[in-house]
Amino acid sequence: MNTALTRMLAIEYPIIMAPMFLVSNTNMVIEALKSGITAAIPALNFKTDAELRQAIESIQKETQKPFGINLIVNKSNPGYQQQLKTLIELNVAFVITSLGNPKEVIEKCHKQGIKVFCDVVDLDYAQKVEALGADALIAVNNKAGGHPGKLDSATLINLLKTNCKLPVISAGGVATAGEVAITLQCGADGLSIGTVFIASNECRVSDEYKQAVLTYGAADIVSTDKMSGSPLHVIKTPYVEAIGTKANVLERLLNRHKWLKKQVKKIIFKRGMRTMEKAAFSATYRNVWVAGPSIENIKSIRPVSAIVADLVQNIN
């Protein structure tokens, strides 16, 4: 299919396997690239710069097809500068920016011919990153897994296409070929698809997580602010029901002050303060499973290649 995204990256189908925190891995990316789409991994999935570098190089050894890295560009990411340096040095095809001002990323990446796509949830921010020189908009809608936007897919796509000149890549709410076709018909130049790939053979999350994606439906997706202070779409498991979805006073305080959060963790570790630990850190990405409402249409665990083949069957 010929769209702005396929032309920009020279890929067969206008789909990005979305970068998913603690979910995406190099094997998933390699299989996605072999299947005719592109993919991205969060830089934060790697604890050290050496691990990030090794992951990028391992993909590049397997295939020369384009892939990207998702980069958190605000102060919550202390490794931002080194990560950006590594991405430029290893010449990834594109960078997806989240949570901050992408000006520096755009300027430095463009000098090396690296594309920059920016997560946006509204027109105001979209116009700001367009003015900075972004190459495309990742339009995060209200059905996205992880941190969702506020607008539905069609409304957000139309708003951005009407008022911006950049390609619009829709993110959220897609797990089937029919949904891919509808999103493209709404005017999207591409799609960023994540949740359905959790239920892939190559994904290394727990079997319990994968089974939850198959078992639960759209009505079981809830928004919680216990993880980062911002709304996050997760599966309403018995554990999530038990701990609730609203951050308590201590959690809100620690989410606003990262340095304080580190110090509290040190104290808890040294003293074994179980009560405080439960109050401050009961919700972690190990026991709260991120997903979007598109789990409604996910019924089996399949290879990445089979998932892609299903998604693109109506594209021509």
Image (cartoon, helix red, strand yellow):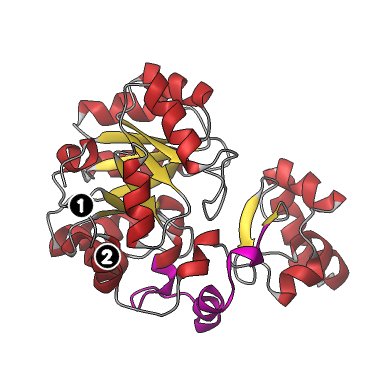
- 57 to the left or right of 160: left
The magenta stretch spans residue 203: yes
Q: Identify the secondary structure beneath mark 1.
A: loop
Position of 157 compared to 63: left or right? right
The structure residue drawn at horizontal position 32% and vertical position 44%, both measured from the top left corner, is: 184
Residue at coordinates 41% horizontally, 19% vertically from top-left? 163
**Residue 248: percent from left, percent from top:** 84, 53
Hey, which quadrant is residue 200 in on the image?
A: bottom left
Mark 1 or mark 2, earlier in chain: 1
Question: Is 164 displayed left or right of 279 in the figure?
Answer: left
> Can you say whether 110 is above or below 41 in the image?
above
Q: Nearer the viewer, residue 259 or 239?
A: 239
Is residue 69 visible in the rendered structure shown here?
Answer: yes
Q: So how many labels did they put on this image?
A: 2
Looking at numbered disc 1 in the image, what kind of residue is underneath it?
Answer: Tyr
Q: Which mark is residue 282?
A: none
Quarter of the figure with residue 268: bottom right
Q: Which residues are magenta?
A: 197-222
Q: Is residue 227 above or below residue 95?
A: below
Q: Nearer the viewer, residue 178 or 147?
A: 178
Magenta segment includes 206: yes
Labels 1 and 2 touching (C-beta < 8 A) = yes
Q: Which residue is mark 2?
A: 308
Q: Would you name the residue on which mark 1 appears?
A: 13
Q: Where is residue 66 shown, x and y percent of the image? A: 19, 49
Q: Is residue 117 above or below residue 293?
A: above
Mark 1 surroundings: few (<14), some (14-19) or many (≥20) residues within 10 A: many
- Tag 2: residue type? Val
In the displayed orientation, state which residue is furthest to the top: 131
Q: Quadrant of residue 117?
A: top left
The x and y percentages for residue 60 are: 17, 57
Residue at coordinates 46% horizontally, 39% vertically from top-left?
A: 154
